[in-house]
Image (cartoon, rainbow, N blue to C red):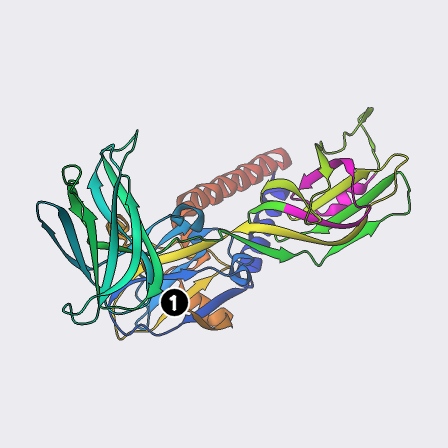
Amino acid sequence: MIKSNRVQLTLFILLFASSLYAQRFQASLSSVDTSGFYKLEIPLEIMKEAENGDDFLLTNEKGDGVAYVLRNLSALTFNRSYQRYKSTISQTEKSTQIVVETNKRPIDHFYIETKNSDVVKNGFILGSDDSKKWFNVRDEILFNPASKTDTRVFLKIDFPKSNYRFYKVIINDSVSAALNIISANYILIDTVEICNTIEARIEDFKYDKSSRDTTRLSMLLSENVFINDINIYVSAPRFFNREVQMYRSKQPIEALQGVRRKKKGRLARKPSYVSYHLKSTDNQQSTLQLDGRYDSVYMDIINGNNLPLSIDSLTFTASRCELVAYLEGKSTYTLSYGGIPDGQGVYDLSFAAHLPQTIQGLGISSISVLNQIEQLQEKEKSAFKIFIEEYGILIIIFVAILVILSISYRLVKDKKEE
């Protein structure tokens, strides 16, 4: 028992010592001039070192922690982005006129909002720089605000790109009653399309094609990065459909390549695999879904009697993630991550409910490795103090039991000798 406890104590000391030498990094962020919401996209270089979002610690120049939220960029995709412009709406017996005042930036379309109505009207649009002298921008515009699902409809008005300060839309109402126009306060800037993934090349992989009927691939990945897909770029043959047996593991790839060994009279099973079909595509990129954190992947591509695949390169895709926080102006901020977990406190995240659609971006000016003294100063409590606080009573009880057993053993021994 004493020997067993010594082994456990030795393991704890080794783990504690290794944690002290774990590398921790610090990224200096670009300066913040004015107070407001800011976002920082987490690059792959940082994702590889941080095990999860709890590893991050955002601090100002005084060392005070700052609350932040992490979000996936896939949730930010939207189709319309509007900028408010001043507009006025007036009506006569025969027409409706909408005048929109812009900032003279070149535009080629905007929207007006109207009540749902099954009617078709025609009109035209004029442009002016002083609202006195008007010029034709486009003739014969058709307005059809009918919808089967919405009570309000956005009518898009397209015209040749121009930079007038004022635009006047005139809708002909001589045949039927006027449209119930709610507003024309918004001009569409652009349709926003966000690429929500990062694609990176897999450098550390082995390509074994010694066997004609099976092509074997083994690759090492960063275990901290959640990988969505593995992309295989095949140059030949042009068209193919191959079965793939993919082993996914958090153990070194060599453990997957070992032969079965006998253990207590049984054959040890090899790790289970996931079966896919690797098919040719128009862009020569075939995708296998991974969806997890693994530091090693092993594939058997079954060629059978077909021509073996000629693989040019391998890449993986990971979701893009960004850190969002409300920062005070005239300050500098740093982001530390990796190594020893921070164990930071719980912050007030109520600001997350008030995030605007457009947020200013932050950049990374430099990344440095913190030395051991800086790491210990950064933490409010060392790992040893935390251990003592949590298990101190148990240690005292354990030592007391050992002392009692030792005394009892000596008493029994002395009694036998007498």
Asked whether the viewer can see residue 401, the reply is yes
User: Within the magenta stretch, is there residue 89?
Assistant: no
Numbered circles on residues, count:
1
In the rendered view, does 324 fall on the left or right side of 165?
right
Left or right of 101 on screen, residue 215: right
Is 193 above or below relative to 279? below
Magenta residues (range): 230-258
- Helix, strand or loop under label 1: loop
Query: Does residue 380 sit above or below 122 in this rendering?
Result: below
Q: Position of residue 293 (x, y in %)?
A: 58, 45
Across and down, in percent, residue 100 comes to: 19, 59
Left or right for 167, reference 361: left
| Residue found at x 71% / y 49% | 284
- Residue name at image x 62 percent, y 57 percent: 200
- Of residues 175 and 165, the one nearer the viewer is 175
Residue 352 position within the rendered picture, expressed as x and y whole percent measured from the top left: 28, 50
> Which residue occupies the foreground of this view, 249 or 165?
165
List x then y, in percent, for residue 161. Answer: 36, 64
Is residue 255 located in the magenta-colored stretch of the structure?
yes
